[in-house]
Amino acid sequence: MTLDRFSGTDRYVATEDLMAAVNASITLGRPVLIKGEPGTGKTQLAEEVAQALDRPFYEWHIKSTTKAQHGLYEYDAVARLRDSQLGDGRVKDIRNYIVKGRLWEAFESERQPVLLIDEIDKADIEFPNDLLRELDRMEFYVHELKETVQARLRPIVIITSNNEKELPDAFLRRCFFHYIRFPDQETMERIVEVHYPGLKKTLLAEALRTFFEVREVQGLKKKPSTSELLDWIKLLLAEDIPAEALASEDRRKSLPPMHGALLKNEQDVHLFEQLIFLNRRNAR
Amino acid sequence: MLVKFFYQLRSAGLPVSVTEFLTLLEAMKNGLGSGDVDEFYYLARSTLVKNEAHFDRFDKVFGDYYRGIESVFGPDPVQLPDDWLRRQAELFLSPEERQRIESLGGFEELMDALKQRLEEQKKRHQGGNRMIGTAGTSPFGAYGFNPEGVRIGQDGSRHRRGAKVWDRREYRNLDDDVQLGTRNIKIALRRLRRFARQGAEEELDLDDTIRSTARQGGLLDIRMVPERHNAIKVLLFLDIGGSMDDHVRLCEELFSAARSEFKHLEYFYFHNCVYESVWRDNRRRHAARTPTMEVLRTYGRDYKLIFVGDATMSPYEIIYPGGSVEHWNEEPGSLWMQRLLDTYGSAVWLNPEPEQRWDYTPSTGLLRDLMERRMFPLTIGGLERGMKELM
């Protein structure tokens, strides 16, 4: 049994409940499923866990066309057929034409690896079911070679989902679950602090206030999230915008500076402009 | 003890399985979640609950269960852990208040008084030891606050984590805006698939490759074909408002499942029965309407027509001109239904009302006849029958 525990890194602020879920998953060797709004650091979590525990890191990004088999291996029959016509010697051994997938690579790792299965909800609705046995037993059978591939060390599996599709119950039952909720102001301050240490207090306070105000506007199509806030602060710093520019008087009269980093949809910008227009009229 | 917790969760409607329960026990055997109650709470939640929409329900059960334990075993008031009390107090007291406590003889003394108070209460009536807040006349009263009340409104406190997290129940408002159980509906809708090959060529066509290789005298000639996609087109008409309000949940589930399952999905809303116009946006349903004639002209005959509605209304709304409850309709609803059905050969009506009740509403019978019996209940089974009918 491993005694490793994850407790955030100097670049990643982990909340207590997140740590509980990740550590349970590490101890029991079962996958942990991470859900949450886009931009709350789901994908980054896996990288940070790998780094914090100093483990090899394997990423498997899922697309709508990804099949479970892609993660295990693929048999390149066409290449073999071509080689056989050209009289290539390699053709004798089928092993030369088995292309290993990410899961297989992770299974072969000498040290316990961290495997990220990113955005599992993008794939076909049956995809998670096809991986049940593989993730449960950490082994699979290769028909072409007639052998079973087994993980040397159960990988730490971190799965992320954007909630685009509902995942099957059988799959969920085998995972630990964590929902990254949107950070509150205090956590957010810590997050900004680890990314931009020594940020001027006034600027940070004004930026955070503006940010949470923008998030509170009803009817936004895409609420800005943590990653947008960090980008925005980066821009503010790069342009050397003073905290006063964010302060209350201006804010009522115009869009926040560099609003393009926060609002990523022309309808949202439009909605905002209308609100400001209303504000100005009310002020008169 | 935990077995009882497990059954409490289940009776609260949380889909907790035995496997998950065993996982929790295994995790505890491995020393997880044994630090303090918060840790156990987080562990239990991440093991047993797999949907953030269920967090609130879980919190409620956990809170009840935890309090239940307290009232059975009752942390002996005299042995109330000091730091727990301190944490509670720190949580609720402002610095000024803390200073005032200091002036009243210090924190320790106050805590002693509080313990004593709690003990007395236990002697007088059972259950009084549950929460400091329920003690009512606790020494804290002098400072004018109530832990129950303050805890809810508190924000930004450094100590918030120390409060009973499950009592904060911060996942409250998610419970109804996340769709539950669309998966079954999606699986049922899957019956309605007709694959066609369109777009970029990216799959190996084995048969054609063999044929063409043979023709080339054995020289490999690879042939590709486009991947298969679901080419079914669906025209969805949803009844909205009035008696349909009872079925909003079910219809939302169907709708969101259908939206992700069909690439070509067009949807319109109507009220009770289809008349000369329908709409796409309920907020602007009086301003932006689409004439039904235009729908008939725009979407080809290969669209499959699905009505969703409870078909519960006055029969006049179907068979008489001017029968609509909302406006004056020149032509009866039945005529419009007939036009739609004439245009689109394959059509079904999905009815969220239970099938047994259909016979008691004349309007349901009328529409069912118009649909030539192609009315199905909006259940997984009914959906499957309906999809079979459409194919």
Image: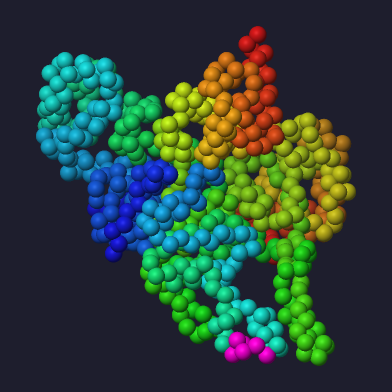
Residue B328 lies in the magenta-colored region: no
Looking at the rendering, which quadrant does residue B291 occupy? top right
User: Which quadrant is the C terminus of chain A positioned in?
Assistant: top right
Q: Position of residue B183 (x, y in %)?
A: 57, 57
In this picture, residue A274 sits left or right of residue B36 = right
Q: Is residue A116 above or below residue B134?
A: below
Looking at the rendering, which quadrant does residue A5 occupy? bottom left
Q: Is residue A81 above or below residue B243?
A: below
In this picture, residue A34 sits left or right of residue B273 = left
Q: Position of residue B383 (x, y in %)?
A: 64, 59
Q: Position of residue B24 (x, y in %)?
A: 32, 57
Q: Is residue A33 visible?
A: no
Q: Residue at x 48, y 70 (%)?
A: A105
Main SS, magenta region, reads: helix
Q: Nearer the viewer, residue A102 or A233?
A: A233
User: Which quadrant is the N terminus of chain A positioned in?
Assistant: bottom left
Residues shaded magenta: A87-92
Q: Residue at x 55, y 83 (%)?
A: A95
Residue placed furthest toward the top: A284
In this picture, residue B330 sits left or right of residue B123 = right
Residue A91 lies in the magenta-colored region: yes
Q: Nearer the viewer, residue B276 or B96?
A: B96
Q: Nearer the viewer, residue B274 or A144?
A: A144
Q: Nearer the viewer, residue A215 or A51?
A: A51
Q: Residue at x 66, y 46 (%)?
A: B310
Q: Residue at x 14, y 21 (%)?
A: B106
